[in-house]
Amino acid sequence: MNDHRTNLPASPTLGTRIHGCTDVYFIVGDPVAQVLAPEVFNPLFARFGIDAAIVPVQVAPADLAAFVKTAFLGKNIKGMWVTIPHKTSVMQVLDHCSALARMAGAVNAIRRNVDGSLEGGLFDGEGFVASLGYFNISYAGQRVLILGAGGAAAAIGASLALARNGVVAAEVAFFDPTPGKAAEVAGRIAAATGTRVQSVASSDPAGFDLVVNASPLGLRLSDALPCDVARLEPSAALVDIVMKNQPTPVVRAARERGLNAQPGFEMLIQQAHLYLDFFGFSEAAAALRHDADGIRKVIYPTALQGEIRPPPSTFFPTP
Protein backbone atom coordinates (compact mmCIF):
# COMPACT_ATOMS: atom_id res chain seq x y z
CA MET A 1 0.00 0.00 0.00
CA ASN A 2 1.40 3.40 -0.97
CA ASP A 3 0.55 5.31 2.19
CA HIS A 4 2.80 8.20 3.15
CA ARG A 5 2.21 7.49 6.82
CA THR A 6 4.62 4.54 6.72
CA ASN A 7 7.40 7.17 6.71
CA LEU A 8 6.11 9.16 9.65
CA PRO A 9 7.84 9.41 13.00
CA ALA A 10 6.06 7.34 15.61
CA SER A 11 3.36 9.06 17.65
CA PRO A 12 3.05 8.45 21.39
CA THR A 13 1.62 5.00 22.08
CA LEU A 14 -2.01 5.38 23.06
CA GLY A 15 -1.95 2.26 25.19
CA THR A 16 0.39 3.93 27.70
CA ARG A 17 -2.04 6.79 28.27
CA ILE A 18 -5.58 5.43 28.14
CA HIS A 19 -7.22 4.57 31.45
CA GLY A 20 -10.65 4.55 33.03
CA CYS A 21 -11.04 8.33 33.14
CA THR A 22 -9.90 9.05 29.58
CA ASP A 23 -12.30 11.01 27.38
CA VAL A 24 -12.81 9.43 23.97
CA TYR A 25 -13.33 11.16 20.62
CA PHE A 26 -14.11 9.30 17.41
CA ILE A 27 -13.35 10.16 13.82
CA VAL A 28 -16.17 8.59 11.84
CA GLY A 29 -15.99 7.82 8.13
CA ASP A 30 -16.20 5.16 5.46
CA PRO A 31 -13.35 4.53 4.67
CA VAL A 32 -11.07 5.72 7.47
CA ALA A 33 -7.70 4.38 6.30
CA GLN A 34 -6.77 7.85 4.99
CA VAL A 35 -7.55 9.87 8.12
CA LEU A 36 -4.75 11.83 9.76
CA ALA A 37 -6.61 13.21 12.78
CA PRO A 38 -5.31 10.58 15.24
CA GLU A 39 -1.71 11.32 14.22
CA VAL A 40 -2.31 15.04 14.63
CA PHE A 41 -4.43 15.26 17.76
CA ASN A 42 -3.28 12.38 19.96
CA PRO A 43 0.25 13.86 20.19
CA LEU A 44 -1.33 17.25 20.91
CA PHE A 45 -3.41 15.76 23.72
CA ALA A 46 -0.24 14.23 25.19
CA ARG A 47 1.73 17.47 24.74
CA PHE A 48 -0.83 19.53 26.64
CA GLY A 49 -1.69 16.97 29.29
CA ILE A 50 -5.22 16.47 27.95
CA ASP A 51 -6.60 13.14 29.15
CA ALA A 52 -8.26 12.21 25.85
CA ALA A 53 -7.76 10.08 22.77
CA ILE A 54 -9.17 10.11 19.25
CA VAL A 55 -9.93 6.78 17.57
CA PRO A 56 -10.99 6.11 13.96
CA VAL A 57 -14.28 4.24 13.47
CA GLN A 58 -15.50 2.95 10.10
CA VAL A 59 -19.29 3.24 9.87
CA ALA A 60 -21.37 2.47 6.79
CA PRO A 61 -23.75 5.23 5.64
CA ALA A 62 -26.83 3.14 6.46
CA ASP A 63 -25.67 2.80 10.08
CA LEU A 64 -24.51 6.37 10.66
CA ALA A 65 -27.53 7.86 12.47
CA ALA A 66 -27.90 4.87 14.78
CA PHE A 67 -24.17 4.83 15.54
CA VAL A 68 -23.93 8.53 16.41
CA LYS A 69 -26.98 8.44 18.67
CA THR A 70 -25.83 5.27 20.42
CA ALA A 71 -22.17 6.29 20.79
CA PHE A 72 -23.07 9.49 22.58
CA LEU A 73 -24.87 7.47 25.24
CA GLY A 74 -21.38 6.70 26.52
CA LYS A 75 -20.60 9.20 29.28
CA ASN A 76 -16.96 9.55 28.24
CA ILE A 77 -17.66 9.91 24.50
CA LYS A 78 -17.25 13.67 24.28
CA GLY A 79 -17.16 14.37 20.55
CA MET A 80 -16.61 13.24 16.99
CA TRP A 81 -14.65 14.31 13.97
CA VAL A 82 -16.62 13.53 10.80
CA THR A 83 -15.11 12.63 7.43
CA ILE A 84 -16.22 11.28 4.05
CA PRO A 85 -18.95 10.47 3.19
CA HIS A 86 -20.81 11.48 6.36
CA LYS A 87 -20.36 15.25 6.63
CA THR A 88 -23.71 15.99 5.02
CA SER A 89 -25.88 13.08 6.15
CA VAL A 90 -24.91 13.42 9.83
CA MET A 91 -26.75 16.75 9.94
CA GLN A 92 -30.03 14.87 10.50
CA VAL A 93 -29.03 13.75 14.01
CA LEU A 94 -27.89 17.17 15.29
CA ASP A 95 -29.80 19.51 17.57
CA HIS A 96 -27.76 22.61 16.65
CA CYS A 97 -25.09 23.68 14.19
CA SER A 98 -23.27 26.83 13.14
CA ALA A 99 -24.66 29.22 10.52
CA LEU A 100 -21.80 28.29 8.18
CA ALA A 101 -22.66 24.61 8.57
CA ARG A 102 -26.30 25.29 7.73
CA MET A 103 -25.30 27.17 4.60
CA ALA A 104 -22.93 24.43 3.44
CA GLY A 105 -25.24 21.66 4.59
CA ALA A 106 -22.40 19.82 6.32
CA VAL A 107 -20.39 19.50 9.53
CA ASN A 108 -17.02 17.96 10.32
CA ALA A 109 -17.21 18.02 14.12
CA ILE A 110 -19.86 17.14 16.72
CA ARG A 111 -19.80 17.82 20.43
CA ARG A 112 -22.18 16.94 23.23
CA ASN A 113 -23.18 19.99 25.20
CA VAL A 114 -23.79 20.07 28.94
CA ASP A 115 -27.55 19.71 28.36
CA GLY A 116 -26.97 16.58 26.27
CA SER A 117 -27.72 18.23 22.93
CA LEU A 118 -25.53 17.49 19.92
CA GLU A 119 -23.97 20.49 18.20
CA GLY A 120 -22.13 20.49 14.88
CA GLY A 121 -19.34 22.73 13.63
CA LEU A 122 -17.75 23.13 10.22
CA PHE A 123 -14.10 24.10 9.80
CA ASP A 124 -13.00 22.68 6.44
CA GLY A 125 -13.70 25.90 4.54
CA GLU A 126 -11.98 28.14 7.05
CA GLY A 127 -8.97 25.84 7.07
CA PHE A 128 -8.88 25.81 3.29
CA VAL A 129 -9.01 29.59 2.97
CA ALA A 130 -6.20 29.92 5.52
CA SER A 131 -4.16 27.33 3.59
CA LEU A 132 -4.37 29.50 0.47
CA GLY A 133 -2.59 32.22 2.40
CA TYR A 134 0.13 29.77 3.43
CA PHE A 135 0.63 28.81 -0.22
CA ASN A 136 0.44 32.40 -1.51
CA ILE A 137 -2.61 31.55 -3.63
CA SER A 138 -5.04 34.42 -4.13
CA TYR A 139 -8.77 33.83 -4.43
CA ALA A 140 -9.98 37.45 -4.26
CA GLY A 141 -11.85 38.23 -7.46
CA GLN A 142 -10.87 34.84 -8.92
CA ARG A 143 -12.87 32.15 -10.69
CA VAL A 144 -12.77 28.91 -8.69
CA LEU A 145 -13.71 25.41 -9.85
CA ILE A 146 -14.46 22.86 -7.13
CA LEU A 147 -14.44 19.23 -8.24
CA GLY A 148 -16.90 17.38 -6.03
CA ALA A 149 -20.00 18.48 -4.14
CA GLY A 150 -19.75 16.58 -0.87
CA GLY A 151 -19.38 18.05 2.60
CA ALA A 152 -15.80 19.26 2.26
CA ALA A 153 -16.47 20.71 -1.19
CA ALA A 154 -19.54 22.57 0.09
CA ALA A 155 -17.59 23.91 3.07
CA ILE A 156 -14.80 25.20 0.81
CA GLY A 157 -17.27 26.78 -1.59
CA ALA A 158 -19.19 28.48 1.21
CA SER A 159 -16.05 30.01 2.72
CA LEU A 160 -14.77 31.22 -0.65
CA ALA A 161 -18.15 32.82 -1.39
CA LEU A 162 -18.39 34.65 1.94
CA ALA A 163 -16.93 38.14 1.96
CA ARG A 164 -14.20 38.47 4.61
CA ASN A 165 -12.77 41.97 4.98
CA GLY A 166 -13.82 42.63 1.40
CA VAL A 167 -12.13 39.48 0.07
CA VAL A 168 -14.36 37.10 -1.88
CA ALA A 169 -14.12 34.92 -4.97
CA ALA A 170 -15.66 36.33 -8.14
CA GLU A 171 -17.22 32.99 -9.01
CA VAL A 172 -17.43 29.53 -7.44
CA ALA A 173 -18.37 26.63 -9.72
CA PHE A 174 -19.09 23.06 -8.66
CA PHE A 175 -18.83 19.93 -10.75
CA ASP A 176 -20.01 16.52 -9.55
CA PRO A 177 -20.92 13.52 -11.70
CA THR A 178 -23.97 12.74 -9.53
CA PRO A 179 -26.97 14.38 -11.27
CA GLY A 180 -28.28 17.41 -9.40
CA LYS A 181 -25.78 17.24 -6.53
CA ALA A 182 -23.62 20.19 -7.61
CA ALA A 183 -26.65 22.30 -8.50
CA GLU A 184 -28.21 21.76 -5.07
CA VAL A 185 -25.04 22.80 -3.23
CA ALA A 186 -24.43 25.78 -5.52
CA GLY A 187 -27.99 27.02 -5.18
CA ARG A 188 -27.91 26.93 -1.39
CA ILE A 189 -24.62 28.84 -1.16
CA ALA A 190 -25.62 31.38 -3.81
CA ALA A 191 -28.84 32.17 -1.97
CA ALA A 192 -26.98 32.73 1.30
CA THR A 193 -24.07 34.83 0.01
CA GLY A 194 -25.01 36.76 -3.10
CA THR A 195 -21.78 35.60 -4.77
CA ARG A 196 -21.97 34.03 -8.23
CA VAL A 197 -22.11 30.31 -7.40
CA GLN A 198 -23.19 27.78 -9.98
CA SER A 199 -22.86 24.19 -11.14
CA VAL A 200 -21.07 23.31 -14.37
CA ALA A 201 -21.52 20.40 -16.72
CA SER A 202 -17.95 19.13 -16.82
CA SER A 203 -14.65 19.06 -14.95
CA ASP A 204 -12.95 21.16 -17.64
CA PRO A 205 -10.63 23.56 -15.75
CA ALA A 206 -10.13 25.97 -18.66
CA GLY A 207 -10.89 29.55 -17.71
CA PHE A 208 -10.55 29.05 -13.95
CA ASP A 209 -7.91 30.67 -11.75
CA LEU A 210 -8.05 28.10 -8.96
CA VAL A 211 -9.05 24.44 -9.20
CA VAL A 212 -9.80 22.41 -6.06
CA ASN A 213 -10.03 18.64 -6.09
CA ALA A 214 -12.54 17.91 -3.32
CA SER A 215 -13.59 14.60 -4.86
CA PRO A 216 -12.42 11.12 -3.76
CA LEU A 217 -10.36 10.77 -6.95
CA GLY A 218 -6.78 10.21 -5.87
CA LEU A 219 -7.43 8.07 -2.82
CA ARG A 220 -6.43 5.13 -5.01
CA LEU A 221 -3.42 5.40 -7.30
CA SER A 222 -5.49 3.72 -10.02
CA ASP A 223 -8.03 6.56 -10.02
CA ALA A 224 -8.41 8.74 -13.08
CA LEU A 225 -7.25 12.33 -12.75
CA PRO A 226 -10.06 14.58 -11.52
CA CYS A 227 -9.53 16.97 -14.44
CA ASP A 228 -7.49 17.36 -17.62
CA VAL A 229 -4.31 19.03 -16.37
CA ALA A 230 -3.39 20.09 -19.92
CA ARG A 231 -6.47 22.35 -19.88
CA LEU A 232 -5.40 24.29 -16.77
CA GLU A 233 -4.62 27.92 -17.45
CA PRO A 234 -0.87 28.79 -17.39
CA SER A 235 -1.46 31.05 -14.38
CA ALA A 236 -3.85 28.73 -12.55
CA ALA A 237 -3.28 27.16 -9.13
CA LEU A 238 -4.48 23.74 -8.00
CA VAL A 239 -5.10 22.30 -4.54
CA ASP A 240 -5.89 18.61 -4.02
CA ILE A 241 -7.41 18.02 -0.57
CA VAL A 242 -6.98 14.23 -0.74
CA MET A 243 -5.05 13.23 2.40
CA LYS A 244 -3.45 10.11 0.95
CA ASN A 245 -0.84 9.37 -1.75
CA GLN A 246 0.46 12.93 -1.73
CA PRO A 247 1.78 14.36 -3.91
CA THR A 248 -1.07 12.83 -5.89
CA PRO A 249 -0.86 12.24 -9.66
CA VAL A 250 -2.83 15.44 -10.35
CA VAL A 251 -0.52 17.50 -8.10
CA ARG A 252 2.55 16.03 -9.78
CA ALA A 253 1.12 16.58 -13.26
CA ALA A 254 0.27 20.23 -12.51
CA ARG A 255 3.72 20.84 -11.04
CA GLU A 256 5.31 19.38 -14.15
CA ARG A 257 3.59 22.21 -16.02
CA GLY A 258 5.15 24.71 -13.62
CA LEU A 259 1.89 25.49 -11.83
CA ASN A 260 1.38 26.22 -8.15
CA ALA A 261 -0.09 22.84 -7.15
CA GLN A 262 -0.42 21.91 -3.48
CA PRO A 263 -1.58 18.99 -1.30
CA GLY A 264 -4.47 19.34 1.10
CA PHE A 265 -2.57 18.74 4.34
CA GLU A 266 -2.51 22.45 5.06
CA MET A 267 -6.32 22.59 5.12
CA LEU A 268 -6.27 20.18 8.07
CA ILE A 269 -3.38 21.96 9.77
CA GLN A 270 -5.00 25.38 9.48
CA GLN A 271 -8.23 24.18 11.08
CA ALA A 272 -6.66 22.16 13.91
CA HIS A 273 -6.94 25.05 16.35
CA LEU A 274 -10.61 25.49 15.42
CA TYR A 275 -11.34 21.88 16.38
CA LEU A 276 -9.54 22.36 19.68
CA ASP A 277 -11.47 25.55 20.47
CA PHE A 278 -14.73 23.79 19.55
CA PHE A 279 -14.02 21.01 22.02
CA GLY A 280 -12.90 23.39 24.77
CA PHE A 281 -9.11 23.01 24.61
CA SER A 282 -8.28 26.71 24.48
CA GLU A 283 -4.63 26.47 25.60
CA ALA A 284 -3.73 23.99 22.88
CA ALA A 285 -5.68 26.02 20.32
CA ALA A 286 -3.77 29.20 21.19
CA ALA A 287 -0.44 27.40 20.82
CA LEU A 288 -1.36 26.10 17.38
CA ARG A 289 -2.46 29.53 16.21
CA HIS A 290 1.05 30.70 17.09
CA ASP A 291 2.97 27.82 15.47
CA ALA A 292 1.74 24.65 13.78
CA ASP A 293 5.00 23.49 12.22
CA GLY A 294 5.16 20.58 14.65
CA ILE A 295 2.07 19.13 12.96
CA ARG A 296 3.55 19.67 9.52
CA LYS A 297 6.60 17.63 10.46
CA VAL A 298 4.33 14.79 11.53
CA ILE A 299 1.97 14.58 8.57
CA TYR A 300 3.94 15.87 5.58
CA PRO A 301 5.37 12.87 3.69
CA THR A 302 9.10 12.56 3.19
CA ALA A 303 8.84 13.78 -0.41
CA LEU A 304 7.31 17.09 0.76
CA GLN A 305 9.19 17.72 4.02
CA GLY A 306 11.47 20.17 2.24
CA GLU A 307 8.46 22.37 1.46
CA ILE A 308 7.75 23.12 5.10
CA ARG A 309 8.74 26.69 5.81
CA PRO A 310 11.34 27.25 8.54
CA PRO A 311 9.39 27.59 11.82
CA PRO A 312 9.87 30.59 14.09
CA SER A 313 10.19 28.16 17.00
CA THR A 314 9.85 24.45 17.65
CA PHE A 315 6.31 23.55 18.72
CA PHE A 316 6.97 20.01 19.96
CA PRO A 317 9.86 19.79 22.43
CA THR A 318 13.00 18.14 21.12
CA PRO A 319 13.56 14.72 22.77
Image (tube, rainbow, N blue to C red):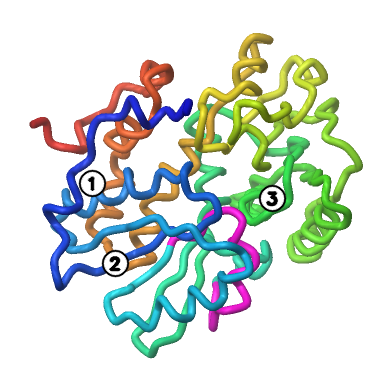
Q: CA distance from mark 1 to mark 3?
A: 31 Å
SS of the residue at dot 1?
A: helix
Q: CA distance from mark 2 to mark 1?
A: 14 Å
- Give percent across and percent down for residue 94: 55, 79
Residue occupying image coordinates x 55% and y 74%: 97
Q: Earlier in the sequence, mark 3 or mark 2?
A: 2
SS of the residue at dot 2?
A: strand
Q: Amino acid at mark 2?
A: Val
In the displayed structure, does residue 3 sit left or right of residue 14? right
Quadrant hosting residue 274: bottom left
Q: CA distance from mark 3 to mark 2?
A: 31 Å
Residue occupying image coordinates x 62% and y 77%: 92
Q: Residue furthest bottom?
A: 115
The number of discs equals 3
Residue linked to disc 2:
24
Residue occupying image coordinates x 47% and y 36%: 265
Q: Is 115 part of what is drawn in magenta?
A: no
SS of the residue at dot 3?
A: helix
Question: What's the mark number on residue 157?
Answer: 3
- Give percent across and percent down for residue 145: 76, 38
Q: Is 94 part of what is drawn in magenta?
A: yes
**From what the image shows, is residue 313 above or below residue 282?**
above
Which of pointers 1 and 3 indicates the residue nearer the eye? 1
Disc 3 crowd, CA 10 A, few/some/many (<14, 14-19, 20+): many
Question: What's the mark number on residue 43?
Answer: 1
Disc 1 crowd, CA 10 A, few/some/many (<14, 14-19, 20+): many
**From what the image shows, is residue 81 above or below residue 135?**
below
152 or 5, nearer to the observer: 5
Find the magenta span and give its range: 81-97
